[in-house]
Image (cartoon, rainbow, N blue to C red):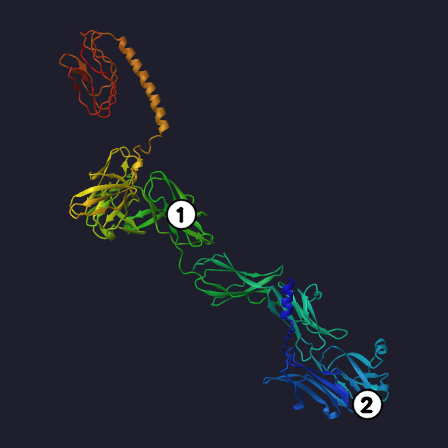
Amino acid sequence: MGHTLLGVLGFFSLNILFYCGHAQDVLLTIEPNWSTVFTGESVTFMCDTRGEKGDNWFYSIYRGDDEFISNNDRENHTVKLQYTGFSGEYQCRAHIRGSIKASNKVSLTVSDKDVILETPASSLFEGESVTLGCRHRDPTKNKNAVFYKDGSAVEMDTNLQSQMMKNTVQVISDRSSSYMCKFGDEESEPIKLTTEPQPKVHLMDIPAEGNVTLSCSVTSSSSSGWKFFWYKGEKTSEPLTKQDAVLLSSGQITVSRGGVYWCRGGRGEPLYYTEYSHSVVTNRAVVSLQPNWPEIYSGETITLTCEIEDGGDTEWEYEWRTSSSTTPPKTREYTFKPSSSEYYWCMGIIKGRESTTKLSDRFTLTPSSNKPEPVLTVSPSWLSPGDSVTLNCRVKHPSAGWRFSWYKAVPKPSDNSYSYELLPDSTTGTEQDSYIVHGQTHTAGYVCRAGRGDPVYHTDNSQPQFVWSGDFGSSASLTVSPDRVQHFTSDSVSLSCEGNSTEWRVRRFTDGDLSDCSTWGTMTGSTCKVDKYWLSGVYWCESGTGEFSNAINITIEYGHIILLSPVRPVTEGRSVTLGCKLKTQNDIYNVVFYKNGKIVQNDTRGELNIFAASKSDEGFYNCKGDNSSQGWSVTSPESWMSVKSSRPENNPPFPVLLVVGLVGGVLLIILLLLFLLLCCCRKSKDSCFNRSQRSNQSPATDQDGSHYASLSHGDLCLYDTIRRPEEPENDSIYINRSQRSNQSPATDQDGSHYASLSHGDLCLYDTIRRPE
């Protein structure tokens, strides 16, 4: 702080004073400072260029229009006034580089009388206390002077007279009265005092870093003898002291910002005061933006606030100015929707006064005409049914007050667009720029947008982004003919939509571009035939009832070879065959298959057979082969092969199946034992059959009279021993317990028979045999 204060003191050490009204660039004073002198006395004329000192100044003294003292480089000139003819008005003129500055005028009377009335040569002000002196040419007679005002003796102050040898008197100056003095019978010439109205002072502030310098000056032709008094707040307050401000000179102080200041001048004893200056408000007005976002957009609502630094408890009114013809309200806050680049200023006005701050610095507001467009990303983009999908919405300046809303896209094939349904828990927007969709099972589209402020200003909607599923689980499905992922550009390919809808469109997403069949094919009913602009990408169907089909990632090959792989995901446990195909009809040799860039088969076979697909078989596949006619090798693009679970989505997890299986097994064993006990108890000559469930079936009879049971689809039978009545009990025919599917009754070579089960039956039976 000490360095700052020294810098301020150094900067203002020139003591520059400011004047207006009758103030002069050069001040002329005389010494002694009396308006009347005796003939033969000397007077010194002093020219003051008000701080503009230097060797280049030249000075001349004029009496009236005549040059009295010729041009020279001295500021002070002492002249002996020999004659009464030297009386008149004197003026100093200062010259520098062809420029002339003239001083105030001083009236001087040269008297040849023996008694003179001495009055100050400097200006007197109406109502100012002034001391008059009476002087005799003979110094020995300067005793017991008597003063008169308009012919009447002036009452003397005995205390003052004793101190000043009774030769002075203090009066209140006025321009209408005539004054004179006497020593005995000798008297002076009567004089009327020349007065000016009560002087004014001019107060101005000079901004400085962290502080304000105030300069106070008397706006009069005479500025000699003035002291300056400073006030803060109200005129009636006590003058500031050194503890309240830094006094730079008699006419300048430095104060901190934040206050209303006044000044006035005073001189003489008792003090004669000038008028109070106008007030200077050192509070600084600052325009601030609310909300203070890095970028403002045309049409959104913002508020400019006029802040008064160190405003305290002062009641303020406000005034705004703009670079346009708009007239803002006279309020602290100015709320509006900017549409173009403009400048704004404000200032504070103390309520009930004319005191104002200076205009604030210019505030430039340049709104962007481009409405922000958020960017949505989805992860994963390909999902397995039941996955959680994370949506992320990016917007410029993400921390600038944005809240995010999330929507699901609903297809509208009739006008080739989407409607948007607000996702749960995002009615008022989310502070987070991400949103998780739990348990997503099918292909779906999403959009997002951001909003901020009150009223809310919304961005545009993002471009729709999609999460794709290859499963045929929804009510709409897409099939490809021919049924493969990779195609040559010359292939004729049809994409067909199926489901409960009469209105369809086929869409493609490639390299960030979303388009429909009308752009690159011909849509006839629910089928799109691709006939132009073949591009690799993701293809799917959208229905008029708002559904998305499964999605297919189709690869278009401009080269000579493609991988033959299925469009649909392969079910676990099923077999699948991958192949290679040349664009020409030539045979292909030495086919190598790759999975995720590593060789998985390299032999003479032209196909890759996977007999029981599992999740471990998922991956990117491609192939390479030799062209039989050209003799060179070509490699196909990669395609992803997906393997899905064979267990339906509604199947219970493994622990549940295990428990159910164990309980069912125990119950089955108990039932079997009960049936065996019942059958053993029933001894008869007839063939014995255990309880069974029959469905429109009759017993079958063998040539030797033995019988076997026939089971239709859905029967669940438990059989015990079957024998003919004439056969001994130890010669039994047995039905073996087994599960059979789509079999007819069979006869063994030895003539034994076994039961036949249709598809879906679950039977337990024993081997049927003849007795040996």
**Classed neighbour count for the residue bearing mark 2: other residues with Cα under 10 Å, few (<14), some (14–19), many (≥20):** some
Percent x, y for residue 625?
Answer: 21, 44
Does 723 appear above or below 456? above
**Image check: 374 left or right of 699?**
right
Name the residue beneath numbered marker 2: 114
On the image, the x and y values in percent for residue 715 come to 24, 21
Residue pictured at 81% horizontal, 85% vertical:
135
| Residue identifier under label 1 | 392
Q: Image height check: is 700 above or below 74?
A: above
The amino acid on which the numbered mark 2 sits, given as a three-letter code, is Asp
Question: Closer to the camera, 511 or 506?
Answer: 511
Q: Secondary structure at mark 1?
A: strand
Residue 349: x and y in percent read 59, 65
Task: Give yes or no for contact between labels 1 and 2 (Cβ–Cβ under 8 Å).
Answer: no
Frontmost of labels 1 and 2 is 1
Separation of residues labelled 1 and 2 (CA atoms)? 107 Å
Task: Look at the picture and state if 697 lies above or below 403.
Answer: above
